[in-house]
Image (spheres, grey):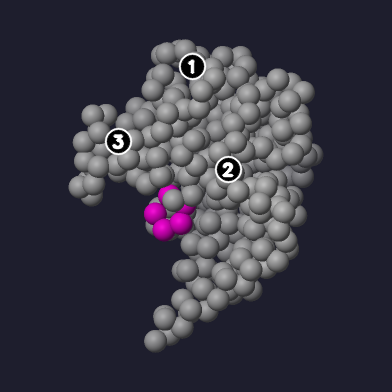
Amino acid sequence: MAVLRRLTQSRRSPSERTALAGEAAAEAAEAALRAEPAPAGAAESAGADGRTGSAGADGSAGADGKKPAKAPKPPAENHTPDRDDPRAAAFFDCDNTILRGAAIFYLGVGLYRRSFFTQRDVARFAWQQAWFRLHGTEDPGHMADAQHTALGLVAGKHTADLEEICEEIFEEVIAEKIWPGTRALVQMHLDAGQRVWLVTAAPQEVARIIARRLGMTGALGTVAEAEDGVYTGRLVGELLHGPAKAAAVRALARRERLDLGRCAAYSDSANDIPMLSLVGHPYVVNPDGALRRHARAMGWRVRDFRTGRKAARVGIPAAAALGVAAGATAAGVAIHRRRAV
């Protein structure tokens, strides 16, 4: 990783930054896997509602004494993963594919509760999250804004501290946002003995936690540069988004000796067409309009686990989004007042 850090200091073309981001994500994912060896699907796995426990394969109670809900069955007409195929794996996008909404915005909410953000910041993030939920697609400007803010906040902070905070934020915010239908698809691949990877633009620290809580093999996420365990406020390469995701999957497949023609990939966004096009079994989950049209033209399988989506669009999206922002700001004020008492 030291070599990768040095490379980021020089000016590089967009394609070079994309490749660098992919290589950095693959290297970080493999390093995490070596540091925490565990069989896929073991120990911690999430139930149908996304909540976690340490129940065994027999469904026995977890560490909290509660028996977790069984994961729902995968939708009909899925391709059947080949069992114990050492060269096959599955790659899952995160935002709006595994989670309702975007992980980086949920991270923002959690950081706000820890006084990392102002009320104005949280109102802006709430608007961006509402826009994403209502339109079903990512806005590059919103992502760049969130990235710039996040990097500025973590600069000078210890990586271990952020990882601890991310664990807390998963329990507080993210666990209940997991789509049961996509969770079932993850489990389908795990049950077949395949490796399953999360691929997301979210920071690798958040990505690893989500992947671990779902029993996945590991995660490919955006790598923030760090020196001696402290964030510099820069990225290694660029945000793991669009073509960078495809680069990361390709780099990991090379390292893990996977045959991408035997692999599956799942995403909701047309931005991930490069990643979906790499594999032999592309799936479209909760798609935006552009990806749905592309999937129809290519004959890709489509799964939509959303409800009430059309009703939301028939209303007044701007008013709904402003309502979310206002609600979030009001909640923030209430939290601030309670702390001040």
Q: Earlier in the sequence, mark 1 or mark 3?
A: 3
**In the figure, is residue 109 to the left or right of 140?**
left
Mark 2 highlights which residue? 306
- List the residue tagged with mark 1: 81
Please tell me which of labels 2 and 3 falls first in the chain: 3
Q: Is residue 121 visible?
A: no
| Relative to 131, 114 lies left or right | left
Outermost residue, bottom side:
341
In the image, residue 121 sits, relative to residue 232, either above or below, namely below
Q: Residue at horizontal 25%, vertical 42%?
A: 67
Looking at numbered disc 1 in the image, what kind of residue is underneath it?
Answer: Pro
Residue holding disc 3: 43
Spot occupied by residue 267 in the image (x, y as percentages of width and height): 62, 34
What is the secondary structure assignment of the residue under circle 3? loop
Q: Please tell me which residue is depicted at 51% across the width and 73% down the height of the picture.
A: 331
Q: Is residue 275 magenta?
A: no
Quadrant assignment for the C terminus: bottom left
The residues colored magenta run 171-175
Distance between mark 2 and mark 3 Cα atoms: 29 Å
State if disc 2 and disc 1 touch (CB < 8 Å): no
Camera-near label (2 vs 3) is: 2
User: Front-most of 185 and 38?
Assistant: 185
Choose mark 1 or mark 3, whichever is in front: 1
Quarter of the image containing the N terminus? Answer: top right
246 sits to left or right of 328: right
Q: CA distance from mark 1 to mark 2?
A: 24 Å
- Which residue is painted at 50% across and 35% down in the image? 182
Q: In the image, what residue type sits under mark 3?
A: Ala
Q: Secondary structure at mark 1?
A: loop
Q: Quadrant of residue 301?
A: top right
Mark 2–mark 3 CB contact (< 8 Å): no
Q: CA distance from mark 1 to mark 3?
A: 22 Å
